[in-house]
Amino acid sequence: MKTAAACLKGFYLHLGTHGVNPVLAEALRVTRLPTRADRRRAMLGHVLHSMPANPLAPAQQVRRHPKVLPEGARDLLLGTASCARDRMVVTWLADGGFRIGELCGLRLVDLHLREQAACGQCRGPHVHICHRQDNANRARVKTKAPWTWQDNVVCGGTVRRASPAMIHTYFPSTPPSPFTACSWSAGTAPPEANRGPPQRPAACCAGPRVEMGRVVPHAFRHSFGTAVLDAARGNAVIARDAGGWASAATVEQVYGHVDVHDPVFTMALEQAWGTRP
């Protein structure tokens, strides 16, 4: 639609140069402020002051925060999921704040979903996110934290807590392998032997079917970071450890999104303005 609108605008501007409907051609010569992407694409973009706009282009449905999930997205996706595997993908992305490479790179030996696991690194249920180069689905973990395999137990890596909902959705989906190319149903086999056929979670592509627009898996991580940061009352250190970020500054600068329609946000502004008793 945007391409068709651009062609139509160019056609009317061309007719305007020949004296056909000059009023319409003049109305189409509108401008807008340059975006960050416009400045990056243009040579000497830092001196840009305006960019041509197209009134004929269709209006976009802009979210309050483009990087986070739409309101009610989790419930809609869970209702659309057609199998236990997809419900597990949505739940683990929402409650764990995983990157998609971390989620698709997990293996059975990484899951310590019982209390007092043998690794001794966390009392509650948790998972170990380990960077591996030999995953059959080519999944890669961004953070290369050191990890070891000793006595059939994985230790190290990035430890991430598991919620009761994550545990509840995991067990109905096995066996067989729930969604990764690294089969979780291989028991306690060593990581090198723990493989399976590649699969693609349909839940990550269900956004258009439920009329939410394009929903990417990383949006779950932004929503998770924002929710933990709000629950921790702005304590970025807690949010950093909960989501496995490298620094607390990253959480505050990249993953901390404030809802301008939140009553707390409005209350803070009114108090700062002196209009609230």
Image: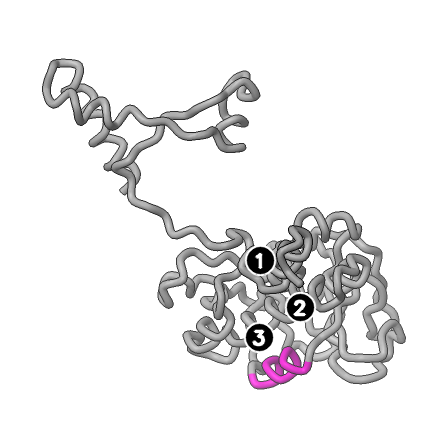
Mark closer to the chain start, 1 or 2:
2
| Distance between mark 3 and mark 1 Cα atoms | 38 Å
Residue type highlighted by circle 3: Ser
* Residue highlighted by disc 1: 259
Q: Is residue 203 magenta?
A: no
Per the image, the residue denoted by label 3 is 177
Magenta stretch: helix, strand or loop mostly: helix
Residue 166 on the magenta segment: yes
Q: Residue at x 73, y 48 (%)?
A: 250
For the residues bearing labels 3 and 2, Cβ distance under 8 angstroms: no
Q: Quadrant of residue 211?
A: bottom left
Depth order, front residue of 237/218? 237
Q: Secondary structure at mark 3?
A: loop
Is the C terminus in the top left, top right, bottom left or bottom right quadrant? bottom right
Q: Quadrant of residue 264?
A: bottom right
Please provide the residue range marked out in magenta.
Answer: 164-172
Give the number of the mark in front: 3 or 2: 2
Residue 243, horizontal then vertical, whole percent: 72, 61
Residue at figure coordinates x 81%, y 55% from the top left: 145
Task: Say left or right for 41 vs 209.
Answer: right
Which residue position is annotated with label 2? 96
